[in-house]
Amino acid sequence: MKKIEAIIKPFKLDDVRDALMEMGITGMTVTEVKGFGRQKGHTEVYRGAEYAVDFLPKVKLEIVLSDDLVERAVEAIVEVARSGKIGDGKIFVLPVEDVIRIRTGERADAAV
């Protein structure tokens, strides 16, 4: 099993969710986060004063999948979330040792 952590632009969330649901992936955790990479934020003007916005709003998706679905899920996220502009985000794929469904005690792929 693997865990996919994808940091994407917030307005891409619905499209990514729909693409993953079409693949049969129904479970994910979504967190609103802030951060920056190469974009290094931007400046805004408020009431005539210019100020720097160092951390930009992003959305973090966390999905645990069986190994056979990981590559297709990554490709779907990249295809849908890519705008070609800086700040599109990143995807991290991490190994998962075990998963336990609390309600039933099921483990591994049965718990996902």
Image: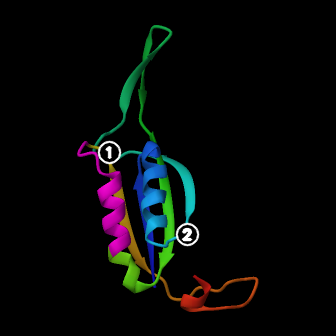
The percent position of residue 83, horizontal first and vertical second, equals: 28, 45
18 to 10, vertically: above or below: below
80 to 38, vertically: above or below: below
SS type, badge 2: loop
Q: How many marks?
A: 2
Identity, as a three-letter code, of the amino acid under mark 1 = Gly
35 to 21, vertically: above or below: above
51 to 6, vertically: above or below: above
Q: Earlier in the sequence, mark 1 or mark 2?
A: 2
Magenta stretch contains residue 97 = no
Where, quadrant-wise, is the C terminus in this rendering?
bottom right
Q: Dot 1 corresponds to which residue?
A: 87
Q: Dot 2 corresponds to which residue?
A: 26
Query: What range is drawn magenta here?
Result: 72-85
SS type, badge 1: loop
Residue farthest along the left direction in this orientation: 84
- Rate crowding at label 2 as few (under 14), some (14 to 19) or many (20 or more) other CA atoms within 10 Å: few
